[in-house]
Image (cartoon, grey):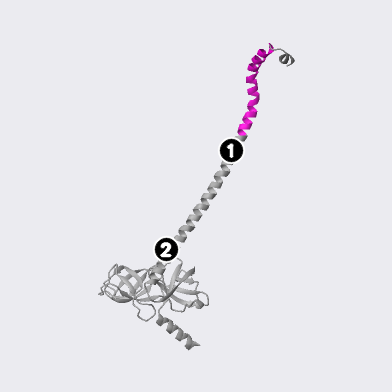
Amino acid sequence: MFLDYRYEQFRSMRGSVSTVVFPVKKIVDAPLACARGFGGFLATQKHLFAENQKLREEQLLFHGRLQKLAALEKENEHLRELMKSGAQVSENMFIANIINIDPDPFTHQVILNKGRVHGVFDGQTVIDANGIMGSVISVNEYESRAMLITDASHAVPVENVRNGLRAIAVGTGGSNLELRHVPKSLDINEGDVFISSGLGGRFPVGFPVGKVHSVKRDRGKPFATIIVHPSAKLDRGGHILLIRSSDKKVKHEEANAITQ
């Protein structure tokens, strides 16, 4: 090193020695270079993994928000249909929510979040945007219970829109209604639409009840078997309308006055 520093002629020898030593230097540095490269690779992989995980979480949150928006949009659409249905009639009405369903498989009943303090009373008609759902059967201060028209204990006086024939639509305990005690000779066909007739004063006149799904006229039976699909969407949505005519309201208030 001293000679190389002091004399010029040794500089050419230094270049030759460097050329010979270069492969050895590379071989010696190879493990360190590999270690540095592998460490960088691991750091890059870790960073990419963390970034990928973050993007997955953001995507999941985004899809969750989209589902919530879709649910809100569907709920708003359902409310618009309810209000549109309410604008077509003159009865007093207000919106309630279904907060629970009776777990008993042999009954079709729901719990509503409106009670006596909100003006709900026994026998009040319950509808959705498509037709009659049922009627209130019990009321407490802040909640009430309604029986759906498909319950085996429920019956609605109805009228055929096409020809005016009247009948009683009774719940089957399943998903349909049945027109009871209808003579085979009466003119009722598949596709006929039935609305509430208002007979008996329990239900208001003119609300859709259902459409005839099937008609069977057996020779050995005096009455036809007529199955009707409900117009109301009994298994969908959480919002309903409670309606009452002014006559019903007056009768209810008179009954309360007499009781008191």
Q: Which residues are magenta?
A: 9-38
In percent of the image, x 57 and y 42: which residue is there?
Answer: 49
Label 1 is placed on what type of residue?
Thr
The residue under label 2 is 77
In percent of width and height, residue 8 lies at 69, 12
In percent of width and height, residue 143 lies at 51, 74
Q: Secondary structure at mark 2?
A: helix
In percent of width and height, residue 96 lies at 47, 71
Residue with the most extreme right position: 2
Q: Nearer the viewer, residue 229 or 205?
A: 205
Label 2 is placed on what type of residue?
Glu
Label annotation for residue 44 = 1
Mark 1 Cα-neighbour bin, 10 Å: few <14, some 14–19, many ≥20: few
- In the rendered structure, does residue 22 fall within the stretch colored magenta? yes
Q: Nearer the viewer, residue 197 or 95?
A: 95
Quadrant where the N terminus sits is top right
Residue with the most extreme top position: 9
Q: Are marks 1 and 2 in contact (CB under 8 Å)?
A: no
Please give left or right for residue 58 compared with residue 204 in the image.
right
Quadrant in the rendering for residue 40: top right
Q: Specify which label sits upstream in the sequence, 1 or 2.
A: 1
Label annotation for residue 58 = none
In percent of width and height, residue 228 lies at 34, 69
**Magenta portion: prevailing SS class:** helix
Q: Nearer the viewer, residue 136 or 184?
A: 136
- In the rendered structure, does residue 212 fall within the stretch colored magenta? no
Distance between mark 1 and mark 2 Cα atoms = 49 Å
Q: Is 232 above or below relative to 251?
A: above
Q: Is 10 above or below relative to 183?
A: above
In percent of the image, x 64 and y 28: which residue is there?
Answer: 31
Q: Secondary structure at mark 1?
A: helix
Mark 2 Cα-neighbour bin, 10 Å: few <14, some 14–19, many ≥20: few
